[in-house]
Image: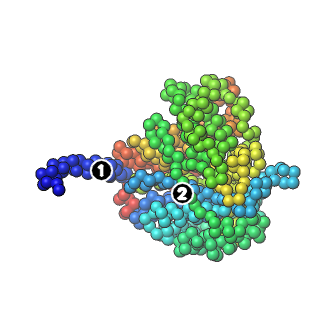
Amino acid sequence: MKSRHQTIRRWPRIALWLALLLLPTLALAEVKPHAAGIASANKQATEAGFEILAQGGNAFDAAVAVSAALAVVEPESSGLGGGGFFLLHRASDGKAVFVDAREKAPLAASRDMYLDADGNAQRALSVNGALAAGIPGLPAGLVLVAERYGKLPLKQSLAPAIRLARKGYIWSAKNAAMIGFRTEQLAKSEGAAALFLRKGKPPAKGDRIFNPDIAKVLERIAGEGHRGFYDGKTARTLVEGVKAAGGIWSLDDLAQYQAVEREPLRFQFQGEEILTSPPPSSGGVALVGLFQILSGYPLAEFDRVQRLHVEIEAMRRVYRDRAIYLGDPDFVQMPMQMLLSPYYAAGLRASIHTRKATPSDALPGISAGPEGSDTSHFSIIDSEGNIAAVTQSVNLPFGAAFVVPGTGFVLNNEMDDFSVKPGVPNAFGLIGDDANAIEPGKRPLSSMTPTILLGKDRVAAIGSPGGSRIITMVFLGLSKVLAGSSAAEAVSAPRIHHQYQPDSVSVEPGALSEAEISALTERGYTVAPAERPWGNMQVVIWNKQDRSVDAASDPRWEGVGGGESRDREMIFR
Ligand code: DON
């Protein structure tokens, strides 16, 4: 038995241990943000997120609200007929999770389903209409995030989206611009025409749009959770409608669909920790590669052209690896250890000439396009320090441009993200091989790259739409944030892009000077100035020093996006 004296002597040690145990909690408590920030591609969706924060929800409840609101107000970019990735970081215990709500190939899909009798790819089939649609994942993602990470009932977080659908939302400049690309195709689908066209013409900017059909589907999800979409009336309507239009979905496809929790990729750059997206996103693996290749250079000593040179060469190499190795982790073995290793990056770095471009054909892989500008990213940091970086998509504008009558949402054309034939580029000019070939129940490889910076002084959530260019955008935007830029500076920074094939550097208007373009051309690059800028980046940064939160929306869609931070008093007003 211990003497009283012994017990008393132990006290200082116990107190010390207790203090040590409590220290992280106290430290965490000190660095909570003063405010919350939300940046999304549409102000009405950002507002939905703040509404849920005001009701006591956390960043994950707000993510559900923003995601569902975007599904209503930004149908060209994402929605219930599509999928997405939710990268979450919880402040209370530091848990990080990647919720994979990516679409899956239907069980009746087959490797050559988009090839004709001569083996030629029939790209129209993987892009337009019911056969182009994978099994949607976003509804499952909403339910999973709300149930496992939210504080509020799903019903409450979906309420703003339901209200927008029932009481109407405002057709934005972006809605109006994007529908122009797809009007002809939308007119061919009875359901899409009824939803989006008036006597064959799209709505005008500023019109109020009502969508009672999607409200009913959202209400079913609110009431029954996962089953509200993947079983019962919604599932039956979808399967019947898809089959009637030549698609191959079955009730089994919907019954088997589950969103999956995966371990995010974690890496360090300049001593800062970064969380990003694992396969079936290709973005995180590429991002790790890009930063690791660059970490071996004295970047601060480089002039602009030399920095561009090493960045473009790094881009070329990581996109080549994407094409060769990456696919759905549930189906393919990927050399992840190799791809993520600093030694592998050092080997790639060693293959970069100090001043000359490496022709892509000198790096044999797969032989090889165009551009696109949809999908939706949003970033949220709440006043507890919880973080959500979410990218969701239906792939091309208005997805497959196909709506099952009575459902109120377009189906995706994410099947085009598979490699329909080795070496044949998809809508984003991306090529692939066996790893990303079509198989029943497989998820197509994605470029969506929601990413979180857990820096010592700055925490940030970042992402963008933009197809194959998402990865280089996140890389350039994150590089800005790491260098101390504000959210507005990060989202507005000019963009360049290289994706191995085609072997050219895309350059946004005004991104490079004439002198820089000449210097790159001299080094052996084919510089392809783009006619239009690309992307729609949404960034939220929490500066731990002064506890401020800074949110910004890409200025390329000026006036439509909503990047805003609000202090506690404003939220709970
Ligand atoms: O998952 C992907 O990589 C594509 N479906 C994303 C499409 C996209 O960003 C469209 N915007 N340009």
Q: On the picture, is 112 further left or further right than 528?
A: right
Mark 1: amino acid = Leu
Q: Is mark 1 within 8 Å of ligand 1?
A: no
Mark 2 closeness class: few <14, some 14–19, many ≥20 residues within 10 Å: some
Q: Spatial distance from mark 2 to mark 1, Cα to Cα?
A: 29 Å
Question: Which quadrant holds residue 73?
Answer: bottom right
Q: Secondary structure at mark 1?
A: helix
| Mark seen at residue 433 | none
Residue picked out by circle 2: 261
Mark 1 closeness class: few <14, some 14–19, many ≥20 residues within 10 Å: few
Which residue reaches farthest left?
Answer: 5
Q: Nearer the viewer, residue 508 or 247?
A: 247
Q: Secondary structure at mark 2?
A: strand
Residue picked out by circle 1: 21
Mark 2: amino acid = Glu
The residue lying at 52 percent from left, 32 percent from top is 295
Residue 462 visible: no
Which residue reaches farthest front?
Answer: 1
Which residue reaches farthest right?
Answer: 118
The quadrant of the image that shows the C terminus is: bottom left
Question: Which quadrant holds residue 305?
Answer: top right
Q: Position of residue 190 (x, y in %)?
A: 74, 69
Q: Position of residue 392 (x, y in %)?
A: 59, 56
The residue lying at 50 percent from left, 61 percent from top is 145
The quadrant of the image that shows the N terminus is: bottom left
Residue 104 visible: yes
Q: Nearer the viewer, residue 232 or 46?
A: 232
